[in-house]
Image (cartoon, rainbow, N blue to C red):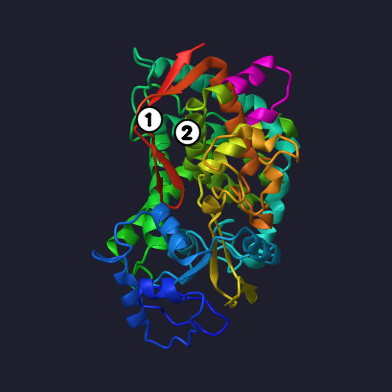
Amino acid sequence: MIIALHYSKLRPVLNFSCLQQCVRTVTVSAATEKLQQTELKSFLHFMPGGSLHNINSTELTHKLYDIYGPIVRIDSMFSKDAIVLLYDAESAGIILRNENNMPIRISFKSLSYYRQKYKKSENDRTDRPTGLVSDHGELWKSFRSAVNPVLLQPKTIRLYSSALEEVATDMVERLRSLRDENNRIRGQFDQEMNLWSLESIGVVALGNRLNCFDSNLQDDSPVKRLIECVHQMFVLSNELDLKPSIWTYVSTPLFRKTMKMYEEQENLTKYFIKKALDDIKMNKSKSDDEKPVLEKLLDINEEYAYIMASDMLVAGVDTTSNTMSATLYLMAINQDKQQKLREEVMSKNGKRSYLRACIKEAMRILPVVSGNMRRTTKEYNILGYHIPENVDIAFAHQHLSMMEKYYPRPTEFIPERWLTNKSDPLYYGNAHPFANSPFGFGVRSCIGRRIAELEVETFLSKIVENFQVEWSGSSPRVEQTSINYFKGPFNFIFKDL
């Protein structure tokens, strides 16, 4: 149920048109309806005939803002907690800055359940870490503090440049071989991007090639099974964790399917990690600079090493591949920007400022995640409304980054806004710092940011150095699950230079 927010307590408003008229003036009283009644009334909006039936997540976000303004609450439905959607950068900054000691970010509840309860044995320690996504509090803080130096130091990450360049070069040759007579890629382009991203993150995390580019790779190979598991993770978690569901009360078929998928995913990452460990044992002579993330973390904490390597193989596939596809599309339909980037790359002068600007602009227009979340640990007054403790807040960064008041000419691909001087109205620094946040904020920001940036920079450079990338046909669509999927048909044309 969409309800008005006020300093007094909250009551569900049962009619959207009523809320549209009254949201700024109505005084709302305490909500004391029974849980079943509240959930049923909320759920009806998503049923056939309801105002939100058959609407995708992106459309829902825009529709709620257009009707109700910069702050909206969606009431709890079955296992899904109530959530406040925030479309105001200043308000987002207030909460994010104040929740930056050990912030609570509730996401992937089904994954947390699998790791903390479903697979837990009687002999497991109560303080056993499960991962940066599923852990909170001191357990999360210890884990994050241990892995930060290995994964977030730019100097450390740059040590993987040569390995990633080798992967990018091989992928360029693969794309060249996959073209038809019209220079289009035969087969599934998104699958090719997944193979590239898995091979890239594998060489960083594990230190060896996973052979994702093997021309004889079968659909039931560990590589392709892991890619499918990653995709299913985002799709199934979207159904269980972001939509109304009764899985926390009843073991539904979808819940059982998801638990089985998490188990297969875990077994597959163990398979790759075991192969990497065998390789590490055989190559003890590597210097510290040459060690993969797994080996560096083994020197710090063995438990953290296994978990982090596994999570890197999972989190670094669909996110990076969809970022790359979206960036290539924007380059293809903006040939002047592509040429400017090519000139920078071909100059070989070491500067990569325009390259980075292109990637930043792509992530502003077509981000791989729609926003960030926090669970409040204190009370707030936001836009005249009272937000109590223990409430989930979703910051609609994807929506904010496309607002004219933050970014002039927001729908245009203008990498120059990230490079121009302060006197230019397009200058990115004129925007509120919390209007665009593709990697999150603060101590809970994306742990793989530096790696992902280096992967995309390396591959995009190789692409524009070798191909004139064009797009022919209808525009792509973006499908929002737990992440944004850049969906086909993929009308890319890769012409040799």
Query: What amino acid type should be assigned to the residue bearing mark 1?
Result: Phe
Position of residue 210 relative to residue 269, above or below, is above
Q: Which mark is residue 325?
A: 2
Please tell me whether residue 259 belongs to the stretch shown in magenta. Answer: no
Query: What amino acid type should be assigned to the residue bearing mark 2?
Result: Ser
Residue at 64%, 77% (x, y): give it.
379
Image location (x, y in percent) of residue 286: 70, 30
Residue 207 visible in rendering: no
Main SS, magenta residues: helix
| SS for callout 1 | loop
Please tell me whether residue 348 belongs to the stretch shown in magenta. Answer: yes
Image marks 2 and 1: residues in contact by CB distance under 8 Å:
yes
Measured in 3D between alpha carbons, the distance from the residue under mark 2 to the one under mark 1, in whole angstroms, is: 9 Å
Position of residue 302 relative to residue 215, above or below, is below
Residue toward you, 204 or 319: 319
Image location (x, y in percent) of residue 193: 46, 31
Q: Which mark is residue 490?
A: 1
Screen quadrant of the N terminus: bottom left
For label 2, count other residues whose C-alpha is less than 10 Å away and answer few (under 14), some (14-19) or many (20+). Answer: many
Residue toward you, 68 or 84: 68
Residue 373 shown left or right of residue 2 in the figure: right
Residue 127 visible in rendering: yes
Residue sitting farthest toward the left: 48
Residue interval drawn in magenta: 339-355
Residue at 55%, 37% (x, y): give it.
362
Residue toward you, 423 or 87: 423
Position of residue 425 relative to residue 378, above or below, is above
Q: Quadrant of residue 443?
A: bottom right
Image location (x, y in percent) of residue 176: 44, 16
